[in-house]
């Protein structure tokens, strides 16, 4: 195991209940890094990290896979390091984050008129209402990734969180529709499959990050998640318990590094090192008489770099990113009077010194750094509780959300079958012979559990014929 990899510790004295929990793997394909994290929930509902590996990302720019071969190699390297941290792992399928400038969103409205108005609204009717939105017109070459209900209405009743059990003539809802470029999604799936894995589901990265760093109180108070990655900055706004808005800002940490490289005339690796070690998002907080000395190229004299000039470059780009955040907040009418939870900064770029102060000054909102330690068990390496791994931890949580909802649905169906049998066989013994007697339906989509909105059949929409070429 390489010296810079976390020492993953596993508990061999696990309970039977713990052993039954599946191992779920999140794969974050980013512009600067590719990370694979394997985790399993313990008996207390916390994630135990069972394996971790990361590799430098090659072939990905601004969140999009442009070179499949290089991306495959980086994924395989991250997996190898994950196996090194825990040789007993057997990874076959992964939850993958998706982001990039091709991601778009729009708002729609849908209604259905019910045929049996005396009966209570059933889940099947809500599923039909959601399915109708997948026929919404979008530009050629794009694909609907997900349809997320926001507020339901039943006749004259407004802002209903869950209409199941209501009665009425017309059921409607406002929807947040997320779309992406078909080719971009296909390239992600192809890279994962050629690396020897199966994509269990694609999850929008800002929503995965939100799941890792946001609490129920944040969801209720209203909060903006700003995930500053290498190629893009992803924004997700939550208000009154629902996902209100998503956006992709086409700037990230790589843009800052390139600005430093061009502005100071240094190599990219030097620019990145200076940004991490000496960078600040506020030039006023740096000393004007402090300098960084870097080696000269090919025998040339060493170069002196002003720390204040470095901060000026960083502040200019970070101010541009935060101006975009403010713009999107105003677009949906959510300013500092509405988002009581403020802004949660996460992602690798959120670790810049004095970024919180700059964010609060430019947006007028309180800000904090979101780290994914709330859902981790007590035994984890400190490196994994860094903002850059929020997406990966959130992907594991998404996997467990699917797993637990499926088990709950099976239990509900079992009870339903038993109850129906009891009503039709009064006085007789009720026996349910096998699990296949149950009827599987889609899990309920609640507004509080926004992660339930992701469809497990997303991957099937982009399946291709096997590639027979070498």
Image (tube, helix red, strand yellow):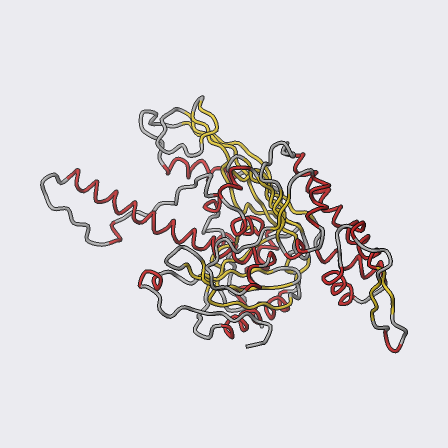
Q: Is residue 191 left or right of residue 251?
A: left
Residue 155, relative to residue 311: is it above or below?
above
Q: Which quadrant holds residue 76? A: bottom right
Q: Front-most of 416 and 334? A: 334
Residue 132, relative to residue 62: is it above or below?
above
Q: Front-most of 404 and 287? A: 287
Quarter in which the C terminus is drawn: bottom right
Task: Looking at this view, name the residue that lies furthest to the top.
Answer: 156
Q: Front-most of 460 and 233? A: 233
Residue 387, relative to residue 244: is it above or below?
below
Numbered label tally? 0
Task: Looking at this view, name the residue that lies furthest to the right.
Answer: 301
Q: Residue at x 60, y 42 (%)?
A: 224
Residue 466 percent across, percent down from the top left: 51, 65
Residue 10 percent across, percent down from the top left: 43, 69
Q: Which quadrant holds residue 245? A: top right
């Amino acid at each position: 195991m390489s010296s810079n990899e976390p020492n993953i510790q596993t508990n061999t004295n696990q309970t039977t209940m713990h052993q039954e929990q599946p191992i779920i793997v999140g794969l974050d394909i980013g512009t600067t890094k590719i990370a694979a994290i394997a985790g399993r929930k313990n008996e207390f509902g916390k994630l135990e990290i069972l394996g971790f590996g990361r590799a430098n990302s090659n072939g990905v720019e601004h969140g999009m896979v442009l070179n499949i071969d290089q991306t495959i190699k980086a994924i395989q390297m991250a997996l190898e390091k994950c196996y090194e941290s825990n040789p007993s792992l057997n990874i076959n399928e992964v939850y993958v984050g998706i982001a990039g400038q091709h991601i778009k969103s729009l708002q729609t409205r849908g209604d259905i008129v019910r045929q049996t108005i005396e009966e209570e609204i059933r889940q099947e009717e809500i599923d039909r209402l959601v399915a109708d939105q997948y026929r919404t017109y979008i530009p050629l070459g794009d694909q609907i990734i997900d349809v997320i209900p926001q507020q339901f209405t039943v006749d004259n009743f407004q802002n209903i969180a869950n209409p199941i059990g209501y009665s009425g003539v017309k059921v409607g809802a406002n929807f947040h529709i997320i779309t992406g470029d078909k080719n971009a999604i296909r390239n992600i799936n192809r890279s994962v499959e050629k690396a020897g894995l199966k994509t269990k589901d694609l999850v929008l990265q800002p929503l995965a990050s939100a799941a890792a760093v946001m609490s129920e109180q944040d969801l209720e108070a209203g909060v903006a998640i700003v995930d500053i990655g290498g190629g893009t900055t992803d924004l997700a706004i939550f208000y009154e318990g629902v996902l209100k808005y998503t956006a992709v800002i086409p700037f990230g940490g790589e843009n800052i590094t390139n600005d430093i490289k061009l502005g100071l005339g240094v190599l990219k690796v030097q620019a990145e090192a200076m940004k991490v070690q000496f960078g600040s998002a506020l030039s006023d907080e740096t000393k004007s008489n402090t300098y960084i000395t870097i080696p000269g190229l090919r025998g040339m004299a060493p170069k002196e770099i002003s720390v204040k000039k470095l901060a000026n470059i960083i502040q200019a780009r970070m101010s541009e990113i935060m101006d975009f955040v403010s713009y999107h907040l105003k677009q949906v009418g959510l300013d500092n009077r509405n988002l009581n939870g403020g802004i949660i900064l996460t992602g690798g770029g959120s670790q810049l010194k004095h970024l919180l102060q700059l964010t609060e000054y430019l947006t007028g909102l309180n800000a904090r750094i979101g780290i994914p330690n709330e859902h981790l068990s007590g035994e984890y390496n400190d490196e994994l509780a860094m903002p850059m791994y929020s997406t990966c931890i959130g992907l594991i949580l998404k996997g467990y959300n699917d797993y637990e909802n499926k088990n709950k649905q099976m239990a509900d169906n079992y009870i339903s079958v038993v109850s129906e049998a009891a009503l039709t066989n009064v006085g007789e013994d009720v026996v349910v012979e096998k699990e296949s007697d149950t009827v599987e339906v889609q899990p309920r989509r609640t507004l509080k559990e926004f992660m339930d909105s992701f469809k497990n059949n997303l991957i099937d929409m982009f399946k291709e014929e096997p590639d027979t070429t070498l």
